[in-house]
Image: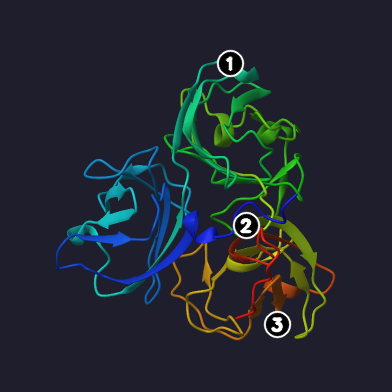
Amino acid sequence: MAYTTIDDPTIFFTTLLRDSIYGGSDTSYDIGFQPDWIWDKVRSTSGVHSLFDSVRGVGSSGKIIYSHQGNVETTNALIKSIDSSGFTVTASADHASQTIVDWCWKAGTTFSNSAGANGADLASSGSYNRDAGFSIVTFTGNATDDQQIYHGLNSVPVWMVLKNRTNSNAENWCVYHEKLGNTKKLTLDTTATATTNVEFWSDETPTSTVFTVGRQDATNGSGNTHVVYCFSEVKGYSKFSKYTGNGNADGAFAYTGFRPAWVMVRDPNNAENWLMYDSKRPGYNLTNNHLFANTTDTETASTANTMDLLSNGFKVRSSNNGLNRSGGTFLYMAFAESPFVNSNGIPTNAR
């Protein structure tokens, strides 16, 4: 079996750095694929994390949610259209006079699954990319325990990010990570430690067909619509695992099997931020330019949270507790810039 089935990860995920076009004309950006999930963040000043996708819709009636807050979905026209090879930004809705980062993932195959089909209790619809192990799923909840929902991947999701879109009284974002287990969830928009509650995932591990939610409003609010971003692990392209901190500047190494394009790290057992890195923002190597998924903070170039992005993983270069607490367990999510070894057996280079 080949080391990887994805020799060019940039056809499924990429980071775009751009300048604000506010006051100018609507602008299209060619990234080489249709970005079905776009995560937009101002870098040069404090500003929101704006999340759009092709399933909930874009354009004049486009829907936006924010990773740093638990607010319900609202209408926002920042992304004018998602195109076959990129996306178009509405100038009048753009951030004013700032530098911006857009992280983009490809899904692309639409689906609709009725209740009762594929072992599901609730109907779902969305878009999937089985090659890249990514799907966007929407469903309407019923506040009932042990509800199974079809995700479209044909492989087991190991990272899921779920948001109740319509209930203002619901809890915040819910994050499932395989290494945290099916009894716990994290909140993407806070520094809260992992919470144990059977009402989130019904203590059920996802399968290659469905994932399970309990009766909590956050994951299955009655009559509420929800969106879930589901990821399974693809060798040489994505990795969702953990490492143990050692508390010194010669920090822990995490083997991913590829040169990372994007890494997010979270300590689930302490009140720490969600640290976000990518290979395009300046400061590498050491990579010290980072953002926090749970705050509106300006991009930070502090040396308190630094790492090297290597040909086969990343190495922490900081003793900071948020990234390398001694004895701490750190969850990470990572996507590739280049596989460590491609399908022809040719190794990649470090940067």
Picture disc at residue 318: 3
Where is residue 17? Give x, y as percent: 38, 71
Q: What whole-number distance in Å separates the C-alpha atoms at marks 2 and 1?
A: 30 Å
The label nearer to you, 1 versus 3, is: 1
Q: Secondary structure at mark 2?
A: loop
Position in image of residue 199 (x %, y %): 68, 32
Would you name the residue on which mark 1 appears? 117
Distance from disc 1 to disc 3, alpha carbons, whole Å, reads: 49 Å
* Element marked by disc 3: loop
What residue appears at the point 32 percent right and 48 percent down from the top-left corner?
82
Q: Is residue 120 visible?
A: no
Mark 2 or 3: in front is 2
In this view, the residue in front, 256 or 61, is: 256
Residue linked to disc 2: 237
Residue nearer the viewer, 75 or 25: 25
Q: Which label's residue is closer to the chain start, 2 or 1?
A: 1
Q: Residues within 10 Å of mark 3 (few under 14, many from 20)?
A: many
Residue type of the residue flagged with mark 3: Ser
Q: Quadrant of residue 62?
A: top left
**In front here: 252 or 175?**
252
Residue at the left extreme of this rendering? 24
Residue at image location 52% in from the left, 62% down from the top: 293
| Quadrant where the C terminus is found in the figure | bottom right
**Does the residue at mark 1 contact the one at mark 3 (Cβ under 8 Å)?**
no
